[in-house]
Amino acid sequence: MKSTLLFLCVVSVVVITEACKCFLSHPQTNFCRSDYVIKARILGESNVDNFRKKYKVQVLVNYKSGYTRPFRDSVIWISTATQSAACGVTFDIGNTYVITGSISNGEFNTHTCTWNSKVTDLTSFQRNALQNGIYRDNCNCKIRSCPHNVCEQGEGCLAPYATSSCYDEQAACTRSLGTCQWTQNSC
């Protein structure tokens, strides 16, 4: 009996430690933390090794900066882990996504803790915020989440955890008259 319990405890720990864990972040926060933010069509996939794979993508829009890499209509490779447990992303070939991530030694990287979404899954507010630079132009405004709905006062926009999906889908934190506040706050 003791050996069975010990075995179950060990298996539980292994399963728990193999999962990818991310802090919930507003799309604007992910946008601002990322080295690149693009709209891209997935052209193909290639395994690098047992741990990494790359996606060949055609860049349709560079939301972060239209004057730096990756350029519109260029074809680039984006690297990610092969396993979701290692925060690897899976893209469907032929579909169009908003992809965010980091650039390291000239290599584009992404993972599940950044903002990667099919364009068809974006809300109209998110599409507008990307196209019109609302996220880009307000990176100086910080979004603070409130776990357990306990929000401490301070600089930036507060996002209560219970309604965070509403804020993610329908609002941006923008500067107006010297302070940061939520736009379209219907949450």
Image (spheres, helix red, strand yellow):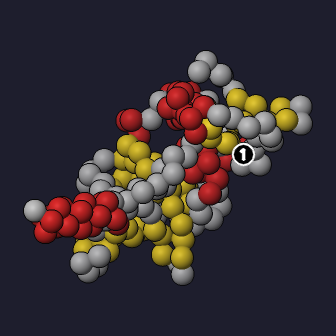
- Work out whether 31 lies above or below 10: above
- Neighbor class of circle 1 (other Cα within 10 Å; few <14, some 14-19, many 20+) is some
Residue at 57% across / 51% down in the picture?
30
Residue at 66% across / 22% down in the picture?
184
| Image position, residue 157 (x, y; %) | 72, 36
The residue tagged 1 is 142
Q: Of 158 and 107, which appears nearest the observer? A: 158
The amino acid beneath tag 1 is Lys
Q: Quadrant of residue 80?
A: bottom left
Q: Of 92 and 59, which appears nearest the observer? A: 92
Q: Classify residue 27 as left or right of residue 49.
A: right
| Image position, residue 132 (x, y; %) | 64, 37
Identify the image quadrant of the C terminus.
top right
Q: Quadrant of residue 35?
A: bottom right
Of all residues, the one furthest to the front in this rendering is: 1
- Inspect this view and state whether residue 174 appears: no
- Work out whether 128 lies above or below 86: above
Identify the secondary structure beneath mark 1: loop
Q: Of 101 and 113, which appears nearest the observer? A: 113
Count how many numbered circles sit on residues in the image: 1
| Image position, residue 57 (x, y; %) | 37, 61
Q: Of 160 and 91, which appears nearest the observer? A: 160
Q: Quadrant of residue 182?
A: top right
Residue at 56% across / 35% down in the picture?
148
| Image position, residue 5 (x, y; %) | 17, 62
Residue at 67% across / 47% down in the picture?
136
Q: Classify residue 133 as left or right of residue 89.
A: right
